[in-house]
Amino acid sequence: MAIDYSQLIPNNVDLGSDRRLQRALENWQPRFLDWWKDMGPDGTSAFEVYLRTAISVDANGWANFGYVKMPDYRWGIFLAGQDPDRQIAYGDSKGKPAWQDVPGELRSTLRRLIVTQGDTEPASVEQQRLLGKTAPSLYDLRNLFQINVEEGRHLWAMVYLLHAYFGRDGREEAEALLERHSGDPDKPRILGAFNEQTPDWLSFFMFTFFTDRDGKYQLASLAESGFDPLARSCRFMLTEEAHHMFVGETGISRIIQRTCELMKEHKTDDVRALGAIDLPTMQKYLNFHFSVSLDLFGQEASTNAANYYTMGVKGRFLETRIDDDHLLTGSSYEIETIEDGRIVKKAVPALQALNERLRQDYIEDCARGVLRWNKIIEKAGVNFEMKLPHRGFDRRIGAFTGSRVSPDGKVLSEAEWKANEAKWLPTDEDRAYVTSLMGPAVVQPGKFAHWIAPPARGINGQPADFEYVRFN
Ligand code: BYC
């Protein structure tokens, strides 16, 4: 029986008027639900979760709160409002009207970017599949599920573009998005960080702080795309993304706060003996997630990035606010690289350095969050400072690959690295300790696991003991 998708899938793309598109989505939707059942949050289909659902893009419509069973969540398709006069802001097509359809010569490039973006969304849901079993509170459990359903919606956003604009190839790519799986040796996800595990809540909060923030910067660059439907999709996705980073930042803040409280109360640094997560262990997790996320920006000098820009498919962060010629053909940009065993600064054509420039914007944003974490530590009177490691630390993509760089930016021999690695990155023992603190899930309203402080306020103004998840 035909499903009325304009009813079932809230949307502002007039789905009801396009039979071909409807049929394509009718085909894909049950596969998505099968994937959600098999690879989404484990054993949760009967839970009723206090979720926000977007039913329109305006201020009142994008955050509708209510109890929803996740398989019944209405994964809507929303593009930010259209500016009929929008012009492409950069590259060879600068000043031309934004494209409402895919220019033939950009078809494979755009498809590839949309697929790469789309691939990360279900990947993160897969990575977080088991976390519900060890949630430190109902509040946190609800936030995990909110993020999961919204990553699902972001997948829908990219699948909509593939179905609506890329014909048969697009439909095949949409299928493949459900066939690759995080960490699968035969069919892995496309980007490295999305094949790592997110086995515990410290990892989850670090992931949502660091890796979701890559999402923010990549989406912001794609929000500058000359292909208007992509730009508008990404602009709306960014609205939801902010909550994901909030969960990461406040999650880590609350762990820091709890740890510092225990350190003060018991006048000790040895908080492991007290069942909390010590600050040096948090620093190691930070180092890991930061460096894995830096890799997501690609090579420092990249002809792909130069081509994306020149062709008008992917811009810079807040492109229109930058005061330059938006062509970048004559300018250069300084990147760091390794030459003769030393880290050196080197000017490269600015067009080639766009990945690095975006990475730099990202690093500055991360640093502001770390500063806020340090304020909590300082306020507690504890003598410890969290730091972002050097951008060359433990990298697998780009100029630093194959070199050993310490967190403070010294190039090391393999022996020096080996002698210190356990101080800088989580060891098996650290991971086992953090895992030992996880679970079983804390399910009494208003109660929190011992190692994390309660949040400053509830979701949507709800009280501390609100029943965010009802188990049925
Ligand atoms: N892993 O010239 P380069 C999010 C490949 S997160 C594996 O630098 P380019 C989210 C690259 O494909 C945001 N391979 O590449 C967060 C290329 O391959 P070819 C996701 C990698 O294209 C949390 C080769 O190396 N969105 O939304 O400039 C939860 C040369 O590299 C990696 C996007 O990424 C890697 N890390 O840059 C949920 C936006 N890096 O051409 C969601 C779309 C590079 O030699 N993607 N390679 O076969 C892009 O804009 C670009 O593909 C990248 C790579 C920036 C990722």
Image (spheres, grey):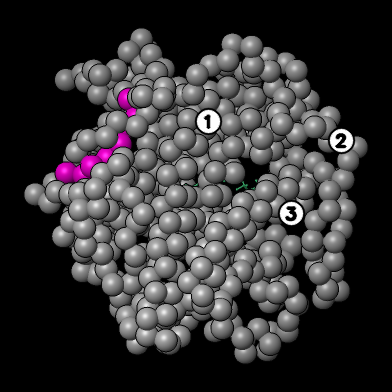
Q: Which mark is residue 235?
A: 1
- The residues tagged by marks 2 and 1 sit, at their Cα atoms, a distance apart of 27 Å
Q: Which residues are magenta?
A: 48-55
Is residue 35 visible in the rendered image? The answer is: no
Q: Residues within 10 Å of mark 3 (few under 14, many from 20)?
A: many
Q: Residues within 10 Å of mark 1 (few under 14, many from 20)?
A: many
Q: Could you tell me which quadrant the N terminus lies in?
A: top left
- Residue position marked by numbered label 3 in the rendering: 300
- Closest to the observer, 227 or 61: 61
Q: Position of residue 318 (x, y in %)?
A: 66, 35
Q: Quadrant of residue 8?
A: top left
Task: Using residue 329 as the reference point, say whether residue 218 is left or right of it.
Answer: left
Is residue 206 visible in the rendered image? The answer is: yes
Choose mark 1 or mark 3, whichever is in front: 1
Task: Using residue 21 as the reference point, say whether residue 135 is left or right of it.
Answer: left
Q: Quadrant of residue 135?
A: bottom left
Q: Residue at x 65, y 83 (%)?
A: 417
Labels 1 and 3: the sequence-earlier one: 1
- Residue position marked by numbered label 2 in the rendering: 329
Q: Residue at x 53, y 56 (%)?
A: 210
Check disc 1 and report its element: helix, strand or loop.
Answer: helix
Given the current orientation, which residue lies at the most extreme right position? 330
Identity, as a three-letter code, of the amino acid under mark 3: Glu
Labels 3 and 2: the sequence-earlier one: 3
Check disc 2 and report its element: helix, strand or loop.
Answer: loop
Identity, as a three-letter code, of the amino acid under mark 2: Thr
